[in-house]
Image: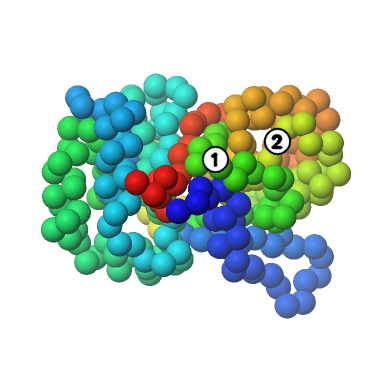
Amino acid sequence: MNYLKLSVLMSFIFLVGCSDEPVEEELETNKVFSEYMTCTPGVDFTDESARMMVDEWNNMEFPEGFFAWGHQPLESLTLGGENKYYWQLFWNTQEDADKAWAEGPSEEFAAWADKYESVLTCDGENRRKYDNHWPRDVDASGEWDEDAAQWVSYAHYCKFNGDDGKEKLDAAVIAFNAYLDEAETGDDGPFTFGIYYHSGENPEPYSDYDFFWMNYYQTHEDAGASYTRFESDGGEIQAMFDEAATCEGPYGMDTFQFYPDPDDA
């Protein structure tokens, strides 16, 4: 299988919501359902054992349109605790996810989990559920490396400042997209972003935040250049974001494509 870049996922999530009779410009977003699991490395965790674990997991059957990523935080302490990793699942709909989890683990999955228990264990029972919005058009996100199954993510944990925070955030995102269209961003590398809203009840401390903003770049160097540029000339847009919500971060992560299998191993 050929390597899949980040924009493949964005092409997949094509459901666009908009009002039939908009009075003013409204935010249009692509949306999918996503789940996060917190994972704990075991005594046998290495880069090689983790790769073997994921390769064998990829040999199982999954629903059409299913994607999975892995995240390794740059900092040892995150919301999930000390020395944690994150396994992220993407589904067509929450109904697809709920159906798959309700069916329970197959014998094949149970054997795989037992085999790699000393490598990595993930807390599927307390997985977090999100409606994942992608407000950036796929054609405007830049040229991603076609051979890359790895990129970087920068997270912001956010709380709305008032009851109208969502409306103000939507207005800020519209302005942000316009800024990105006009800004000289060629030297920053490809970029896109996603906004994660809770879908139902999620456990603490994640539920202490109203949404999570995720920035995606090809490399950490690209991320640094982008943040520096925006700090220099994105003041008006940042003021709109600050009026809508108060955010922590950014918190960097190395992100890996798990499924579809990037190396067909």
Circle 2 packing at 10 Å, graded few (<14), some (14-19), many (20+), is some
Q: Residue furthest bottom?
A: 20
The x, y position of residue 44, in whole percent, is: 21, 27
Badge 1 crowding class, 10 Å Cα cut-off, few under 14, some 14 to 19, many 20 or more, is some
Residue 232 rendering spot, x and y as whole percentages: 81, 25
- Identify the residue at image location x=44%, y=29%: 73
Please give the residue where the numbered disc 1 appears in the rendered image.
148
Image position, residue 211 (x, y; %): 53, 46
Q: Amino acid at mark 1?
A: Ala
Residue 95 appearing in the image: yes
Coloring scheme used:
rainbow
Q: CA distance from mark 1 to mark 2?
A: 13 Å
Question: In this rendering, which labeled residue sits more in front, label 1 or label 2?
Answer: 1
Amino acid tagged 2: Gly
The spot of residue 170 in percent (x, y) is 69, 53
Most foreground residue, 119 or 146 = 146
- Circle 2 sits in a helix, a strand or a loop, which is it? loop
The disc label shown at residue 183, or none? none
Q: Quadrant of residue 26?
A: bottom right
Residue occupying the point 69% across, 45% down: 143
Query: Which one is in front, 212 or 223?
Result: 223
- The answer to whether residue 227 shows anywhere in this view is no
To which quarter of the image does residue 179 belong?
top right
Secondary structure of the residue carrying tag 1 is: loop
Which quadrant would residue 246 be assigned to in this image? top right
171 in relation to 245, above or below: below
So how many labels did they put on this image?
Answer: 2
Give left or right: position of 239 versus 149: right
- The image shows residue 207, relative to residue 170, as above or below, that is above
Q: Earlier in the sequence, mark 1 or mark 2?
A: 1
Residue picked out by circle 2:
189
Residue drawn 13% across the image and 58% down it: 107
